[in-house]
């Protein structure tokens, strides 16, 4: 899909400029209350929908903007500078859009759905984890049951981020009642066809605005809403790499803003005695150096993923080398974001520690600690360990 | 065919969701629950059981998709 989008996509610098304006005027002013009240970033999403950004990854021929994964990561990075929860919801939604765009547009139902998604600016959530399975998204207990041209599907999901706000949910499940746990399908479930019963509230340390509540999900629909390829393929080529690219990019935005706050603190201090460079400036140079490494790793891995997507004949996405690179991206970025915010805190001092100062870093620090847990780093490291044995 | 020996290795190491004894030689092991990660465990166990080493170009999904395909690759390695 991305082969033609790279020629036709909208002007990225203009998009990023608009996004910065939305960030300054709408996202940032609401970030504090989104965090405190653990509420959905309604104002931000109204603004993003008004610009049709929810369908930015949909190809131009279906009415979207035809942006590619590189562009989407840059958008997540910008949003992450203003509110990491807003950026995370945006990122998770784009992952779902990419699953459909990269794998399902051969099917008439999804061609029509792509146009509908653009017209109505649908927000799509994801139900992967399951009670009784834990965080292994490549295993399901629940199964989609097809009878005639209809399906039914029930899932006990400990987490569906912004599930209550979504217009549709992509649900992973076994492809039929006899299938093994790893033989999965992905099903698009519409809000009008789903009953969500809350299992667990969302009162967490960070990423509070993602409203990642648990639900018992009960749904039905047309059999053509089942994505036409095995989830194993979707996971390898899109879900796994796309997710870690957009997540890492919004963490980069979060880290960038923390360093910017540290720079503000250093400049204020330097002003008091312009002829002497303060010690905190050395610390600033040091933390900016870590930010440089984080940004470099992300840019390089996103570029590698873009090359894989731009070459439909490439089998690289199936290889362990690619999967290990994506895992390394996640592991490294999720650790560096905590390191960077911590260093920025030391520079900002008490102004960073206070919740009521302009340089506060409390939300940044709390959000940063979530990065290692969403798909736990130990699980990812364990998978890389297995792959390392045969990787050459 | 050394399919019984392969089947025994699968039963012990492939962590399938079905009983390996019920697998036909042509059954799709990935449909039976083999994943890209458990393929590594299976590969290591086969190397140990048959005292061979899979060459890099045989470390793909195609080699491990059925008992028959594994058996063919093992014969190929033994004959090489």
Image (spheres, coloured by chain):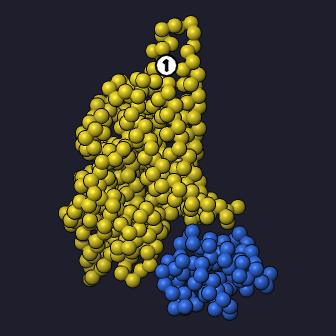
Chain colours: A yellow, B blue
Label 1 is found on which chain of the structure?
A
Q: Which residue is mark 1?
A: A266
- Looking at the rendered structure, the secondary structure element under dot 1 is helix
Residue A44 lies in what quarter of the image?
top left
Q: Where is residue A64 drawn, in percent x and y?
A: 34, 51
Q: Where is residue A80 drawn, in percent x and y?
A: 40, 39
**Which residue is rendered at x = 36% and y = 24% of the image?**
A358
Q: Where is residue A248 drawn, in percent x and y?
A: 48, 46
Q: Where is residue A2 drawn, in percent x and y?
A: 47, 54
Q: Quadrant of the C terminus of chain A?
A: bottom right
Q: Nearer the viewer, residue A175 or A381?
A: A381
**Which residue is rendered at x = 42% and y = 27% of the image?**
A352
Q: Is residue A51 left or right of residue A81?
A: left
Q: Is residue B35 left or right of residue A193?
A: right
Q: Vertically, is B66 above or below A29?
A: below
Marks counted in the figure total 1
Q: Nearer the viewer, residue A172 or A212?
A: A212
Q: Vertically, is A385 above or below B24?
A: above
Q: Nearer the viewer, residue A272 or A324?
A: A272
Residue A108 seen by the camera:
no
Residue A291 lies in what quarter of the image?
top right
Q: Vertically, is A314 above or below B44?
A: above
Residue at the far right: name it: B80
Residue A81 seen by the camera:
yes
Q: Nearer the viewer, residue A351 or A149?
A: A351
**Which residue is rendered at x = 44% and y = 41% of the image?**
A368
Circle 1 packing at 10 Å, graded few (<14), some (14-19), many (20+), is many
Q: Quadrant of the N terminus of chain A?
A: bottom left
């Amino acid at each position: 899909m991305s082969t033609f989008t790279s020629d036709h996509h909208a002007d990225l610098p203009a998009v990023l400029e608009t996004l910065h304006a939305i960030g300054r005027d709408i996202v940032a002013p609401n970030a504090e209350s989104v965090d405190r009240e653990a509420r959905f970033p309604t104002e931000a999403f109204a603004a993003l929908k008004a610009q049709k950004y929810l369908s930015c990854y949909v190809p131009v021929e279906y009415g979207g903007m035809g942006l590619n994964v590189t562009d989407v990561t840059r958008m997540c990075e910008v949003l992450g500078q203003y509110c990491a929860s807003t950026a995370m919801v945006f990122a998770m939604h784009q992952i779902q859009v990419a699953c459909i765009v990269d794998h399902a547009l051969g099917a008439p139902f999804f061609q029509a759905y792509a146009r509908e998604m653009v017209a109505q600016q649908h927000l799509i959530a994801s139900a992967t984890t399951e009670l009784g399975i834990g965080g292994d998204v490549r295993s399901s207990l629940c199964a989609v049951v097809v009878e005639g041209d209809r399906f039914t599907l029930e899932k006990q999901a400990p987490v569906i981020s912004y599930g209550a706000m979504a217009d549709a949910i992509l649900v992973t499940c076994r492809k039929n009642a006899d299938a093994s746990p790893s033989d999965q399908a992905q099903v698009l479930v519409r809000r009008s066809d789903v009953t969500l019963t809350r299992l667990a509230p969302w009162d967490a340390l960070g990423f509070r605005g993602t409203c990642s509540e648990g639900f018992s999900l009960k749904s039905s629909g047309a059999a053509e809403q089942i994505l036409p390829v095995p989830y194993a393929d979707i996971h390898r080529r899109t879900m796994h790499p796309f997710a870690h690219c957009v997540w890492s990019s919004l963490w980069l935005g979060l880290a960038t803003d923390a360093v910017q706050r540290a720079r503000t603190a250093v400049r204020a201090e330097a002003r008091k005695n312009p002829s002497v460079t303060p010690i905190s400036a050395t610390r600033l140079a040091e933390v900016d150096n870590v930010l440089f490494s984080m940004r470099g790793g992300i840019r390089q891995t996103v570029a590698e993923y873009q090359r894989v997507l731009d070459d439909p004949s490439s089998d690289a996405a199936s290889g362990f080398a690619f999967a290990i690179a994506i895992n390394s991206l996640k592991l490294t970025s999720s650790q560096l974001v905590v390191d960077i915010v911590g260093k920025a805190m030391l520079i900002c001092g008490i102004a960073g520690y206070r919740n009521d100062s302009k340089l506060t870093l409390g939300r940044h620090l709390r959000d940063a600690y979530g990065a290692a847990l969403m798909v736990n780093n130990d699980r990812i490291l364990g998978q890389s360990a297995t792959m390392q044995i045969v990787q050459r | 065919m050394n399919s019984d020996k392969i089947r025994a290795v699968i039963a012990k190491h492939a962590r399938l969701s079905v009983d390996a004894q019920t697998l036909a030689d042509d059954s799709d092991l990935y449909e039976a629950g083999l994943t890209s990660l458990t393929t590594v465990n299976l590969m290591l166990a086969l190397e140990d059981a048959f005292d061979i080493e899979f060459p890099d170009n045989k470390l793909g999904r195609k080699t491990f998709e059925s008992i028959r395909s594994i058996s063919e690759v093992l014969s190929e390695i033994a004959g090489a």
